[in-house]
Image (cartoon, coloured by chain):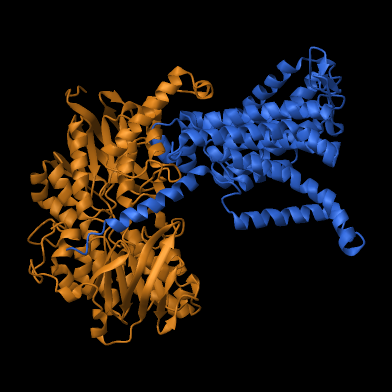
Chain colours: A blue, B orange
């Protein structure tokens, strides 16, 4: 809309940024591998999974304004769906292009199941109910090993098939165009593709009739309904869309990890994803992506940095890096929210608004009824 | 029942109860196609309840209503919106963090159909629809006369613009019946006048209008027919001339005090202030407060306040002497509320000095200011809806520890507002607008203020209630409390006060004694619509 006076150059810049970003993202696993080691490529893979989750939750929390504290349940549904259909657990090895969409669809169904009874709830009440829902799913997974063993209980499911198709498995190194790519690199590119897909879907939804309806419900549900929005359906749609992203990344997680157990789907994870959304900038895709990257990288950096830093400063390790990590992480969260309460990268609308206001002040000043000439 | 073909909305025997209270009982009326139908009545008469029933926010207990021949009782709001009933809200309910344009685009939701698939693929149909939505929204923005950037967030629009944006949003749903709940509330005379033209234009486009309004002048000048509600019952219906002459209406609506003109706020200058008296030149930017010779209780010097890039107050100086009644008037967005908020400590001024009781005020936090005798009754009243009336009043004495004295003061407040004594155990949120204003004022009085700041005490109140509130303001002043009164209704404010300041775009444009200001042509033209 408001791209200034030189749209041509702006467009040029946009393409340059796009090009630079593509190169960085493509080269990232190789650079990280060379500089920091393979472990960090793995962390980058996880970062992408979390970004997908955060973007999914952003639809529910950021767009529609429905506080969901049990979002990880959809991740669990997707992961268990994949694990049960592609592992020795039942001896099933369904192809990935059926299992992944099925996981997203199943999560959708669970999203509606969660959404339907909570339609009348808002704010704190909704948060409590969704929190309970998240725990129910986890406890179910924990206990569905008797009388019939479905989920293998707390032991979890192992030996899950890697993502594979037509005999090409991402679980083993592959050679493409003469470049040898280890498994983590392959997953990185797969996750990158899915993340871009999720970003694309989010962007399209945000700027659409449906997206506006979500935001209207977030702003004022009564007014939205009075304007003819069927709030029941639109809210269920938000739950379903958010859950679908969760289910998708859950399936990818199961294939990537090869092992899942209920432990991975605790309340802490739900809160972590919510933190990514809030800290990054609720409702803004770029902000949520940033939040996801930071909240995955920061604890890892602290894990790897806290021990050596103490050694260097004091000559010995006073505090166990593992416990120090969460302390520093908490402090960092508090500091960010104090300094930037709207998130690190709030939605563009607010910035656009600021420039508008400056014009208005000038206008107001010119409009005085008590003009000097009178 | 057979309907005459020109009837758009037919209500028969509508009743709505809340607990034991009958908000509406046996209300029947019909609205014809293409007319402007006014609904008036004192605060708490059930006007908004009727709106909520017709737009599906409340489910009616008895009776039935048909819209365009189809029965719609017990329908959800979105069904009624689709049927063609759109509304605005008494306390503006825009989508605050969405742009002006997006607000209207949401209104198009019900007449468009792009779903998830269309949004993702952006196929030709979706693109065309989106283009049409944007175009229509821009048209409507112009139509209601908002000439701001369409990207301005709704919450940053001025009050009058927000009211207009709500109308535009409602129009976007292509209503056949547009229900407006007090569209002129908080508008000055000029804004009300242009609202009148807007409503006439809307009717000209074939939309039937149902209008709740306290501005009797607007209702009488605009409506084809008017119904009067009192205590949930329709007492009169007819053309404006009949209604304004009906003794029942005068008794119920304007109170027992029948003056020469049954329509207050009609812009007639009062007897004491002959019209046409020019404001003496020295009044402009004058510092007449020195003449009063008392040590000021509150002295403000060169106060500047800004937020988010806007400078709302651009350097004003004013003073209030102990026990003095001072008015601060000006059009919407002039900076009146901002000034009061800064004095109460809710906003931090950019620059300037405030001395209160001889001490600099800027270091004292908001909660301490209350203890020092500086109390604010905020715009929109800010009562605690889920506490009882008595609990609300007790909250006002939060800063005090003297139990016996508090009990005594509570009795005093009940003497001041006997209506509150009757309702002391009721939740404050269930009171009518006027009663809520009483609670807010009573609560402020409980802190035993030396200076009471009132922000728009008459907003959204019926004339009789306004009268009552202003009587109480006089009573409070008679007890020696200084009052700084911010009011949209300049005439009322200047009649009750001794001195006044006129704020214009963040600067003091005029100041002087209230009778002088009331007589000045500039003030009359700008604020009284005379």
State left or right for residue A200 relative to residue B29.
right
Of residue B397 and residue A22, the one placed in the foreground of this image is A22
Of residue A254 and residue A231, the one placed in the foreground of this image is A254
Q: Is residue B422 visible?
A: no
**B36 in relation to B459, above or below:** above
Q: How many marks?
A: 0
**B401 in relation to A53, above or below:** below
State left or right for residue B205 relative to residue B438.
left
Q: Quadrant of residue A198?
A: top right
**B479 in relation to B240, above or below:** below
Q: Quadrant of residue B35?
A: top left
Q: Residue at x 17, y 32 (%)?
A: B204
Q: Quadrant of residue B146?
A: top left
The image shows residue A19 at horizontal and vertical percentages of 63, 32
Q: Residue at x 33, y 26 (%)?
A: B83
The image shows residue A367 at horizontal and vertical percentages of 26, 56
State left or right for residue B249 relative to residue B63.
left
The image shows residue A186 at horizontal and vertical percentages of 79, 26
Q: Residue at x 44, y 42 (%)?
A: B98
**B521 in relation to A268, above or below:** below
Q: Residue at x 48, y 29 (%)?
A: A208
Q: Quadrant of the N terminus of chain A?
A: top left
Of residue A336 and residue A8, the one placed in the foreground of this image is A8
Q: Is residue A127 visible?
A: yes
Q: Quadrant of the C terminus of chain A?
A: bottom left
User: Hey, which residue is sitting farthest right in the picture?
Assistant: A316
The image shows residue A122 at horizontal and vertical percentages of 54, 42
């Amino acid at each position: 809309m408001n791209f200034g006076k030189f749209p041509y150059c702006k467009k040029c810049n946009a393409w340059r940024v796009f090009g630079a970003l593509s190169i960085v993202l493509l080269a990232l696993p190789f650079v990280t591998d060379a500089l920091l080691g393979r472990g960090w490529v793995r962390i980058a893979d996880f970062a992408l999974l979390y970004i997908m989750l955060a973007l999914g939750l952003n639809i529910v929390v950021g767009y529609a304004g429905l506080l969901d504290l049990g979002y990880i349940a959809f991740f669990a549904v997707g992961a268990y769906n994949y694990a049960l259909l592609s592992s020795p657990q039942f001896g099933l090895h369904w192809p990935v292009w059926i299992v992944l969409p099925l996981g997203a669809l199943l999560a959708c169904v669970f999203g509606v199941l969660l959404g339907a009874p909570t339609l009348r709830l808002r704010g704190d009440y909704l948060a409590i109910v969704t929190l309970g829902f998240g725990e129910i799913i986890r406890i179910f997974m924990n206990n569905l090993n008797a009388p019939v063993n479905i989920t293998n209980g707390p032991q979890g499911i192992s030996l899950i098939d890697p993502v594979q198709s037509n005999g090409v498995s991402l679980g083993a190194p592959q050679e493409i165009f003469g470049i040898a790519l280890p498994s983590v690199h392959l997953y990185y590119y797969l996750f990158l593709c899915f993340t871009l897909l999720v970003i694309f879907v989010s962007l399209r939804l945000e700027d659409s009739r449906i997206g506006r309806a979500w935001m209207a419900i977030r702003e004022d549900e009564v007014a939205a309904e009075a304007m003819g929005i069927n709030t029941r359906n639109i809210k269920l749609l938000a739950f379903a869309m958010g859950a679908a992203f969760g289910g998708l990344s859950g399936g990818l997680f199961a294939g990537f990890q090869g092992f899942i157990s209920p432990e991975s789907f605790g309340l802490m994870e739900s809160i972590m994803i919510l933190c990514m959304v809030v800290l990054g900038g609720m409702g803004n895709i770029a902000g949520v992506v940033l939040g996801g990257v930071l909240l995955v990288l920061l604890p890892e950096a602290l894990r790897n940095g806290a021990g050596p830093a103490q050694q260097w400063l004091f000559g010995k390790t006073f505090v166990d890096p593992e416990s120090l990590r969460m302390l520093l992480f908490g402090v960092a969260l508090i500091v960010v929210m104090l300094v930037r309460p709207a998130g690190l990268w709030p939605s563009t609308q607010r910035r656009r608004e600021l420039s508008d206001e400056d014009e208005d002040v000038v206008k107001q000043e010119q409009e005085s009824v008590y003009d000097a000439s009178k | 029942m057979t309907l005459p073909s020109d009837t758009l909305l037919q209500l028969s025997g509508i009743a709505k109860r809340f607990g034991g209270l009958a908000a509406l009982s046996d209300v029947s009326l019909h609205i014809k196609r293409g007319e402007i139908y006014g609904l008036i009545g004192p605060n708490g008469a059930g006007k908004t309840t009727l709106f909520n029933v017709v737009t599906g926010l409340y489910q009616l207990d008895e009776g039935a209503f048909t819209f365009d021949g189809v029965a719609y009782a017990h329908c959800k709001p979105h069904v009624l919106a689709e049927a063609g009933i759109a509304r605005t809200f008494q306390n503006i309910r825009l989508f605050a963090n969405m742009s002006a344009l997006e607000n209207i685009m949401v209104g198009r939701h019900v007449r468009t159909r792009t779903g998830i698939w269309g949004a993702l693929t952006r196929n030709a149909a979706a693109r065309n629809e989106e283009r049409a939505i944007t175009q229509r929204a821009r048209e409507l923005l112009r139509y209601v006369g908002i000439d701001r950037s369409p990207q301005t967030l709704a919450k940053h629009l001025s009050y009058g613009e927000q009211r207009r944006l709500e109308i535009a949003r409602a129009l976007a749903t292509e209503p056949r019946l547009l229900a407006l709940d007090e569209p002129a509330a908080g508008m000055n005379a000029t804004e009300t006048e242009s609202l009148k033209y807007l409503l006439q234009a809307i009717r000209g486009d074939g939309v039937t209008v149902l209008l709740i309004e306290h501005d009797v002048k607007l209702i009488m000048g605009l409506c084809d027919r008017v119904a009067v509600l009192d205590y949930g019952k329709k007492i009169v219906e007819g053309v404006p001339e009949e209604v304004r002459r009906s003794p029942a209406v005068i008794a119920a609506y304007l109170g027992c005090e029948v003056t020469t003109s049954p329509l207050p706020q009609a812009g007639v200058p009062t007897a004491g202030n002959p019209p046409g008296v020019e404001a003496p030149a020295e009044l402009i930017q004058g510092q007449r407060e020195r003449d009063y010779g008392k040590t000021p209780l509150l002295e403000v010097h060169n106060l500047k306040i800004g937020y988010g890039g806007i400078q709302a107050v651009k350097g004003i100086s004013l003073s209030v002497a102990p026990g003095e009644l001072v008015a601060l008037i000006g059009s919407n967005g002039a900076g009146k509320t901002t000034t009061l908020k800064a004095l109460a400590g809710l906003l931090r001024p950019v620059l300037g000095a405030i001395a209160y009781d001889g001490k600099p005020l800027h270091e004292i936090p908001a909660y301490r200011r209350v203890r020092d005798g500086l109390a604010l009754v905020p715009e929109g009243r800010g009562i605690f809806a889920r506490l009882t009336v008595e609990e609300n009043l007790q909250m006002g004495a939060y800063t005090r520890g003297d139990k016996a004295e508090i009990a005594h003061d509570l009795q005093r407040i009940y003497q001041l507002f006997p209506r509150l004594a009757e309702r002391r155990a009721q939740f404050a949120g269930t009171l009518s607008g006027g009663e809520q204003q009483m609670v807010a004022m009573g609560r402020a009085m409980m802190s035993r203020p030396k200076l009471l700041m009132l922000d728009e005490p008459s907003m959204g109140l019926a004339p009789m209630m306004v009268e009552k509130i202003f009587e109480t303001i006089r009573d409070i002043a008679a007890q020696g409390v200084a009052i700084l009164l911010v009011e949209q209704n300049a005439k009322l404010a200047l009649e009750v006060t001794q001195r006044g300041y006129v704020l214009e775009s963040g600067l003091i444009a005029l100041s002087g004694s209230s009778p002088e200001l009331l007589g000045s042509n500039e003030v009359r033209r700008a604020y009284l619509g005379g």
